[in-house]
Image (cartoon, helix red, strand yellow):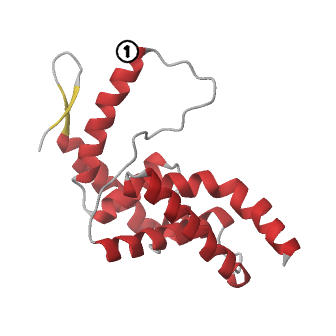
Amino acid sequence: MGESREAFIRDVYQPYHQDVYQYCLYFTNNIEEANDLTQETFVKALHSIGSFQGKSSTRTWIISIARNTTIDFYRKRKFQRLLPEKWRREQPGDVVSPADLADKGADWEVLQLALSSLKKDYRQVVILRALKDFSVRETAEILGWTESKVRVTYHRALQKMKLSIGHDTEGVIFYEK
């Protein structure tokens, strides 16, 4: 068990921990809940690694487990909050000006409002495709959809978001209900 546990940590946990954590954080908007869901995802993955057949990539498989874990969490809790305090990974050593931080915070609020107004399927596909950069194929595998459904749903979600996000005459982004 020790060798297989080390292999799991090396091949699954280390490369995909951040992706799983961010995915969970996008859905919960709560650091503690995201940490708990991330841990639960990897516990489930460790227990089911023997049944992984390699029909999809390891990344797709682990994100599918994270998706199911977050869905179970919402079924139990019956509440829906969305998105983290940050929606982009910050690179170590990046220097961000106060003006950039203010703009990013304002844009973030608009994005959060727009995403939270979408129905669940639209939110999922936008998070996976736009925020997490999964391919159409990977998104289809994670969601258990056809690639065609991913494309159509993503297009519709973006159209819906465009209707609720606008720009004023000075280029400032705002949210309209």
Q: Which residue: 30% across, 56% down?
A: 81
User: Is residue 118 visible to us here?
Assistant: yes
Q: Residues within 10 Å of mark 1 (few under 14, many from 20)?
A: few
Where 164 falls versus 78 (above or below)?
above
Viewport quadrant of the C terminus: top left
* Between 59 and 167, the one nearer to me in the picture: 59
User: Is residue 134 visible to us here?
Assistant: no
* Between 113 and 43, the one nearer to me in the picture: 43
Viewport quadrant of the N terminus: bottom right
At which x and y percent is residue 59? 64, 62
Q: Which residue: 33% across, 76% down?
A: 75
Q: Which residue: 83% across, 74% down?
A: 4
Marker count (numbered): 1
Quarter where residue 105 is shown: top left
* Between 30 and 139, the one nearer to me in the picture: 30
Q: Which residue: 71% across, 81% down?
A: 53
At which x and y percent is residue 153? 33, 61
From this viewpoint, which residue is outermost toward the front? 32
From this viewpoint, which residue is outermost toward the right? 3
Where 133 falls versus 24 (above or below)?
above
At which x and y percent is residue 170? 20, 15
Question: At numbered mark 1, what does the secondary structure look like: helix, strand or loop?
Answer: helix
* Between 42 and 113, the one nearer to me in the picture: 42
* Residue type at the position of mark 1: Ala
From this viewpoint, which residue is outermost toward the bottom? 51
Residue 112 appears left or right of 2: left
At which x and y percent is residue 98? 41, 15
Where 47 falls versus 66 (above or below)?
below
Residue matched to label 1: 99
